[in-house]
Image: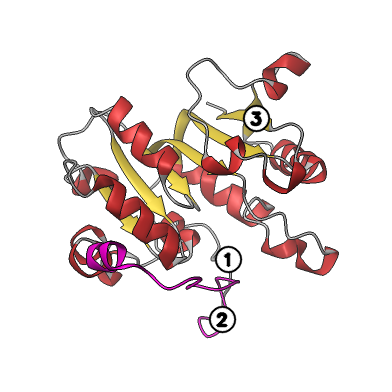
Amino acid sequence: MACKRSLDNPLKKRVFGRKLGRPLNKSRADVINSLLPALSLSADLLKEDGSLAPSSLFPQHKECWMEIGFGSGEHLSALMRRHPENAYLGAEPFINGMAAFLKDIKDDPHERIRVLMDDAMMLGNSLSDDSLDGIYILNPDPWHKKRHHKRRIVNRDNLECFARILKPGGQLIMSTDVPYLADWMITEATIHGGFEWAAKSREDWSTPPKDWIPTVYETKGAKGADKMVYLFFEKKA
């Protein structure tokens, strides 16, 4: 059974912010025109009824992982190259990020990646139960103002969806450089009750694993951040 839609009114805005920032250069415009149509999930698959099985998209691959809000896609493309045996779903609403990602992977095999340039929860709500091995949410928008907290991607409704589509033992991996957003994500995931936090000590959340793939945002120390927080949760069996 599909989880509750993030917004019941289809006319209500579901993606906030600008979908286009600076103009695209020719190479990025070219991949948007040529590669995006081939890799995009079609509207008829996004029914938000929990009927989309990743195995129908990727019948030959061992696992399926999803990255929500992948920015310029450097983490997702590196993950694809590190683990070519797996399949990947990526959601990024902003055209500049999508163009950067597609340009990066244009010469790679494309049978194991599908993308959505829209609200990630359209895809999440469409996926079938127990179908993903892991979900990455790296450096999401903190939506600093209290009246905007409901826009945060990690909230109780969305966590219900993540718990539904992850396999038992599947990983929910999150990171942020904003201390109070880290507190929010830990609290929301703990209150939900369907996830177990893997951290046993401070080092587990303050130090990235040895095989961690850093994002550009992370390596630039965005917004004066002095430390990142790495949160690993598992769906309870």
Kindly identify which residue carries mark 2. Answer: 9
Q: Residue at x 59, y 49 (%)?
A: 160
The answer to which of marks 3 and 1 sits earlier in the sequence is 1
| Magenta-colored segment: predominant secondary structure | loop
What amino acid is labelled 1 in the image? Ser
**Furthest-front residue in this view:** 25
Q: Quadrant of residue 123?
A: bottom left
Kind of element beneath mark 3: strand
**At which x and y percent is residue 137?**
55, 44
**At which x and y percent is residue 66?**
41, 43
Residue range (magenta): 10-31
Instruction: Determine whether 30 is above or below 112 in the image.
Output: below
Along the horizontal axis of the image, is 213 left or right of 145? left
Q: From mark 3 to mark 1, how far is it between C-alphas?
A: 25 Å
What amino acid is labelled 3 in the image? Tyr
Classify 10 Å Cα crowding around label 1: few (below 14), some (14-19), many (20 and above).
some
Q: Quadrant of the N terminus?
A: bottom left
Q: Which mark is residue 230?
A: 3
- Do labels 3 and 1 touch, CB within 8 Å? no
Kind of element beneath mark 2: loop
**At which x and y percent is residue 142?**
72, 54
Q: From mark 1 to mark 2, how far is it between C-alphas?
A: 9 Å
Instruction: Determine whether 212 is above or below 76 in the image.
Output: above
Q: Quadrant of residue 201?
A: top right
The answer to which of marks 3 and 2 sits earlier in the sequence is 2
Would residue 91 be seen by someone viewing this image from the given angle? yes
